[in-house]
């Protein structure tokens, strides 16, 4: 099932358990390996534990049991600030700093890491170009941008310090269909060039099939199965099949409405 | 017309007491800001502190001002001089709006912005100084503004314990049933309050994050 890789996994979950302080388990028995350069999609409904899984990687949450390893080292033992700076993080609400210009938003981590100003400026320009934005917008504030531009800036910011790992939590979920479609295709082209290790959270099967090299299906705090997109469509797993069915029906009805 | 005549005649004394008044309000506001903002930060960051801190500030606020001056009188160093006493009392009163607005301002920062900052690897300190405080600044400043306006009014009462300020005129006027004297205290105090309100309001709008 897993791609043959001579390397050890970049991210590894070993018997991970996560419970809320009140004892309610959000995640149980999670065993998962993510390999270098792949895009692993965590697919599931809200409450299935996919965002929790993501936040365990950059230690916004710490496992209640088991361990999460990033580049072979347990996250619990690593310097949390350094760990987070080595991992790009993109969230649905983007979370751009409203009081900073685009340039300062993107250049924040390099700046606090002490890069010289000229190098930061060059990097910002390079990144804006990479995500398909005009360098002119560098001096604007987030509220002056469209939703699609903002999410592009969010991606550029996550890439600023050139992390090897990128975590994306429904990054295109709040965008209109056309912009989403465009950004999904740009993401594919970008990933083709950058070959980051990406963990991508979505509840949209179509997005998962399009972007993922493997799809990890989650339900009620458990990992159900990990499949390639091709295998996912042919899977006999009842949950995977129900996703395919739901998505297929949706597509059909949408197509019919367009015709009549 | 009498009032204008009175003002012209006593302009030196009015100016002197206005400066005294400003001194009382200024020092106490600075102190309240220096104490209140850290307390607000603490109660926003560690929710355990929220109740005791805001509760205490609330209770202080409910003590009638004259009574508070009285309560503070027996304190050692403080009670020895009327202006120290007045400054302490005014500081205590000014704390609540500063603490409350710091708390509200920081708590009001968009949670996705805070999460993004945390996820990017900002330390708590970087998050506080680069993200939370700048975004909360206009709310904090509006607390300071409330504190200043309230203090300008309250400071007139400080004259009752001999701390000076524009209250001198008011108390003298009350005792002598002389409206000109009362107005000589009340009008400059009102002008001070309005200018502070206007100036800080302007600053607050300037600092409001877009």
Image (tube, grey):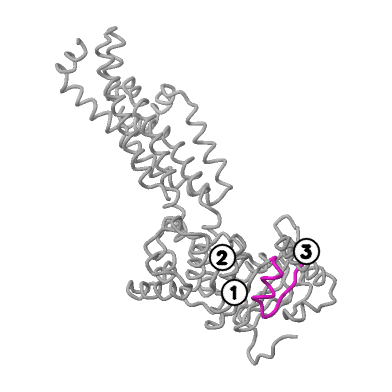
Evaluate if marks 3 and 2 touch, with contact meaning CB atoms under 8 Å apart. no
Residue corresponding to mark 3: A220
Residue sitting nearer the eye, B62 or A106: A106
Q: Position of residue A125 (x, y in %)?
A: 39, 73
Asked if residue A258 lies in the magenta stretch, the reply is no
Q: Report the Cα–Cα distance between label 3 and label 1.
A: 28 Å
On the same chain: label 3 and label 2? Answer: yes
Q: Report the Cα–Cα distance between label 2 and label 1.
A: 40 Å
Of label 2 and label 1, which has the lower sequence position?
Answer: 1
Secondary structure of the residue carrying numbered label 1: helix
B32 on left or right of A178: left
Classify the position of the N terminus of chain A by image quarter.
bottom right
Looking at the image, is mark 3 or mark 1 nearer the viewer?
3
Residue corresponding to mark 1: A77
Residue plotted at (59% across, 72% down): A184
Looking at the image, is mark 3 or mark 2 nearer the viewer?
2
CA neighbours of label 3 inside 10 A, class few (<14), some (14 to 19), many (20+): some
**Magenta extent:** A203-221
A119 on left or right of B1: right
Evaluate if marks 2 and 1 touch, with contact meaning CB atoms under 8 Å apart. no
Q: Chain of mark 1?
A: A
Give the numbered dot on residue A179. 2
CA neighbours of label 1 inside 10 A, class few (<14), some (14 to 19), many (20+): few
A117 on left or right of B5: right
Residue plotted at (31% across, 37% down): B199
Evaluate if marks 3 and 1 touch, with contact meaning CB atoms under 8 Å apart. no
């Amino acid at each position: 099932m897993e791609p043959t890789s001579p390397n050890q996994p970049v991210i590894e979950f070993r018997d991970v358990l996560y419970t809320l302080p009140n004892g309610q388990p959000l995640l149980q028995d999670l065993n998962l390996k993510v390999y270098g350069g792949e895009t692993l999609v965590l697919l599931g409904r809200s409450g299935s534990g996919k965002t929790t899984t993501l936040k365990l990687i950059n230690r916004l949450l710490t496992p209640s049991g088991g361990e999460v390893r990033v580049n072979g080292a347990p996250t619990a033992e690593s310097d949390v600030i350094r760990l987070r700076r080595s991992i790009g993080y993109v969230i649905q609400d983007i979370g751009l700093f409203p009081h900073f210009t685009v340039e300062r938003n993107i250049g924040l981590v390099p700046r606090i890491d002490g890069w010289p100003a000229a190098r930061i400026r060059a990097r910002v320009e390079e990144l804006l170009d990479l995500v398909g934005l005009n360098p002119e917008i560098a001096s604007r504030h987030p509220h002056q941008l469209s939703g699609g531009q903002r999410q592009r800036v969010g991606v550029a910011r996550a890439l600023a310090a050139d992390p090897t790992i990128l975590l994306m939590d429904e990054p295109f979920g709040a965008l209109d269909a056309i912009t989403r479609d465009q950004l999904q295709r740009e993401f594919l082209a970008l990933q083709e060039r950058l070959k980051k290790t990406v963990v991508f959270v979505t509840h949209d099967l179509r997005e998962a099939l399009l972007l993922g090299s493997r799809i990890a299906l989650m339900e009620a705090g458990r990992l159900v199965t990990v499949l390639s997109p091709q295998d996912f469509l042919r899977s006999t797993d009842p949950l995977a099949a129900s996703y395919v069915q739901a998505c297929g029906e949706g597509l059909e009805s949408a197509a019919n409405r367009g015709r009549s | 017309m009498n009032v204008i005549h009175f003002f012209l005649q006593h302009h030196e004394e009015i100016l002197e007491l206005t400066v005294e008044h400003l001194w009382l309000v200024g020092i106490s506001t600075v102190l309240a800001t220096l104490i209140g903002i850290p307390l607000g930060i603490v109660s926003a960051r560690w929710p355990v502190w929220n109740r005791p801190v805001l509760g205490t500030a609330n209770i202080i606020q409910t003590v009638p001002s004259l009574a508070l001056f009285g309560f503070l009188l027996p304190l050692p160093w403080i009670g020895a001089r009327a202006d120290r006493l007045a400054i302490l009392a005014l500081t205590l009163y000014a704390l609540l709006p500063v603490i409350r607005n710091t708390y509200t301002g920081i708590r009001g920062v968009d949670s996705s912005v805070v999460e993004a900052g945390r996820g990017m690897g900002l330390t708590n300190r970087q998050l506080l100084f680069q993200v939370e405080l700048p975004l909360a600044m206009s709310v904090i400043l509006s607390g300071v503004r409330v504190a200043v306006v309230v203090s300008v009014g309250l400071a007139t009462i400080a004259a009752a314990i001999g701390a000076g300020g524009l209250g001198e005129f008011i108390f003298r006027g009350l005792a002598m049933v002389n409206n000109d004297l009362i107005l000589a205290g009340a009008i400059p105090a009102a002008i001070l309050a309005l200018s502070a309100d206007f100036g800080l309001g302007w600053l607050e709008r300037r600092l409001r994050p877009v």
